[in-house]
């Protein structure tokens, strides 16, 4: 296995959403993303087909370079122009000799390639994937002869080195947060709601149980069980089936976890997860945020994320319990929201699971987290998607205005197309800078990642935003500093 990816210094610790990010797992867009066809787009959870080369060169590459400047600067400082001028892009490709191979910005495909070097793991994983994808026995035997780097690419993209597709790609793997979540020094393996993501779960399970980086944490891997009778009940997706995706899980403090009850995360999974977290002493309290079960919202982190101890960005319509009801119009007195459209917040405390606490709104929960969990002495501030302006609030939430990644407290990444939300950050005193300008200033020494504060980094988004996930989705934090 690669020496650089077997360091004894590799540690897991994520106890917040905003502590300075020191290590994360990502997956750069692979060839499978460029093979999504219109007839299968929605089955594969895409709203549209995207242009792969634009995503790679004009958008995601900037994300990778920025992460390296913050987390592993020695791999990129002084080399930016050389990297940009390399037409072959070997710096970005896990199978190439010039691949960055960072131990702090870790490529999931490289982890997969590493474990495939062990013959017994290689045989079991190929057998599992081939059974899942119903390929022929002859093809399964052929795959056993392939190199580890080619195999890793085939398992992810569904495509042989000669370009022949043998099974479907898994284009959602770029959203690495959905396959697993680090909670303090525990690893929660998730269970996707849609069949299109089943292979992602298999890959994650093999990596976390078998890669040397995670050897010390084998006893801290949490798998969500299904309730026993679910397979006897009618329907493939019944309410007893356990499904939970990482976009619905937020580690807001060392003692406090949020779980979204959404269209992708089931009540059964939440029930089993809460019991497991308390039994293993992972956290002391879990807050369940029930959001409307609609494609518009999808996951908890598509409707709010954290910016600073005392600052959050949120879609207003899921915040307040009901914006009507102030008595100023007749409609306030004759209609109410349907149950499936309501947002509800319920908090469970370890040892008092039969005494749940109810919050009146998401804002009330976030204020409680800022003041009581994170001990903020400043007034809690809420930034609303689209600067609270209709129709920009909903338009920009759709393109992930609320799905921001904090690389450190007060320094967040978001799409450049969400103009009204960005203006709301400007009103709060944030510097707004485009990633290409920032990279050049890091390279010249004009700015320093370590001293950067209160900054919204705008990222190019013409194609990436059409994949329906922001930078919070495209990250699996592995280590953050304590706050």
Image (cartoon, helix red, strand yellow):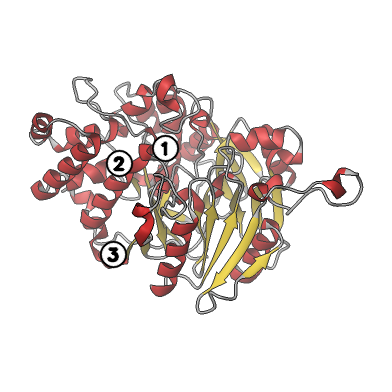
Crowdedness near tag 2: few (<14), some (14–19) or many (≥20) residues, C-alpha within 10 Å: many
Q: Using the image, determine if residue 286 lies above or below residue 425.
A: below
Distance of label 3 from label 1 (alpha carbons): 29 Å
Distance of label 1 from label 2 (alpha carbons): 28 Å
Residue drawn at x 75%, y 41% is 388
The secondary element bearing badge 2 is classed as helix
For discs 1 and 2, the disc positioned in front in the rendered view: 2
Residue 112 location, x and y as percent? 23, 44
Question: Foreground: 125 or 211?
Answer: 125
Name the disc covering residue 217, or none.
3
The secondary element bearing badge 3 is classed as helix
Name the disc covering residue 65, or none.
1
Crowdedness near tag 1: few (<14), some (14–19) or many (≥20) residues, C-alpha within 10 Å: many
Name the disc covering residue 199, or none.
2
Residue 315 location, x and y as percent? 67, 45
Residue drawn at x 57%, y 45% is 293
Name the disc covering residue 113, or none.
none
Crowdedness near tag 3: few (<14), some (14–19) or many (≥20) residues, C-alpha within 10 Å: some
Residue 425 location, x and y as percent? 69, 43
Indicate left or right for 257 with 145 as reference: right
Q: Using the image, determine if residue 28 lies above or below residue 302.
A: above
Reading the chain from its start, which is encountered first: label 2 or label 3? 2
Q: Looking at the image, can residue 368 be seen? A: yes
- The answer to whether mark 1 and mark 2 are in CB contact below 8 A is no
């Amino acid at each position: 296995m690669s020496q650089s990816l077997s360091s004894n210094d590799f540690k897991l610790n994520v106890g917040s959403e905003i502590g300075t990010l020191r290590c994360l797992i990502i997956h750069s867009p692979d060839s499978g993303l460029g093979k999504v066809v219109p007839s299968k787009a929605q089955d594969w959870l895409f709203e549209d087909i995207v242009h792969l080369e634009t995503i790679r060169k004009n958008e995601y590459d900037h994300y990778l370079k920025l992460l390296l400047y913050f987390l592993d600067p020695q791999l990129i400082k002084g080399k930016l122009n050389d990297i940009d001028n390399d037409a072959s892009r070997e710096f970005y490709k896990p199978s190439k000799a010039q691949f960055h191979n960072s131990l702090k910005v870790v490529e999931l495909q490289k982890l997969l390639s590493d474990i495939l070097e062990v013959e017994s793991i290689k045989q079991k994983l190929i057998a599992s994937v081939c059974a899942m994808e119903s390929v022929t026995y002859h093809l399964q035997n052929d795959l056993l002869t392939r190199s580890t780097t080619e195999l890793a690419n085939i398992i992810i993209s569904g495509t042989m080195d000669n370009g022949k597709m043998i099974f479907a790609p898994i284009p959602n793997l770029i959203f690495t947060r959905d396959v697993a979540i680090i909670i303090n020094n525990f690893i929660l393996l998730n269970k996707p709601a849609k069949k299109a993501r089943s292979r992602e779960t298999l890959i994650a399970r093999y990596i976390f149980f078998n890669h040397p980086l995670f050897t010390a944490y084998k006893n801290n891997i949490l798998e969500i069980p299904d309730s026993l009778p679910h397979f006897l009940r009618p329907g493939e997706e019944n309410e007893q089936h356990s499904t939970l995706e990482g976009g619905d899980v937020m580690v807001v403090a060392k003692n406090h976890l949020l779980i979204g009850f959404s269209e992708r995360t089931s009540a059964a999974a939440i029930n089993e997860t809460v019991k497991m977290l308390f039994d293993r002493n992972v956290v002391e309290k879990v807050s369940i945020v029930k959001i409307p079960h609609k494609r518009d919202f999808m996951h908890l982190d598509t409707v709010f994320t954290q910016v600073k101890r005392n600052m959050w960005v949120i879609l207003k319509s899921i915040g307040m319990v009901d914006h009507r009801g102030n008595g100023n119009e007749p409609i306030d007195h004759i209609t109410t929201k349907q149950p499936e459209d309501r947002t509800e917040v319920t908090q469970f405390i370890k040892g008092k699971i039969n005494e749940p606490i109810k919050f009146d709104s998401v804002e009330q929960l976030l204020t409680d987290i800022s003041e009581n969990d994170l001990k903020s002495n400043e007034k809690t501030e809420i930034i609303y998607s689209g600067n609270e302006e209709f129709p920009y609030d909903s338009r920009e939430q759709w393109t992930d205005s609320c799905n921001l990644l904090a690389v450190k407290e007060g320094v967040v990444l978001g799409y450049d197309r969400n103009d009204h939300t960005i203006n709301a950050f400007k009103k709060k005193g944030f510097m707004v800078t485009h990633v290409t300008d920032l990279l050049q200033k890091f390279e010249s020494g004009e700015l320093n990642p370590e001293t950067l504060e209160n900054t919204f980094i705008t990222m190019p988004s013409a194609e990436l935003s059409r994949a329906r996930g922001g930078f919070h989705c495209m990250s699996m934090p592995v280590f953050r500093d304590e706050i």
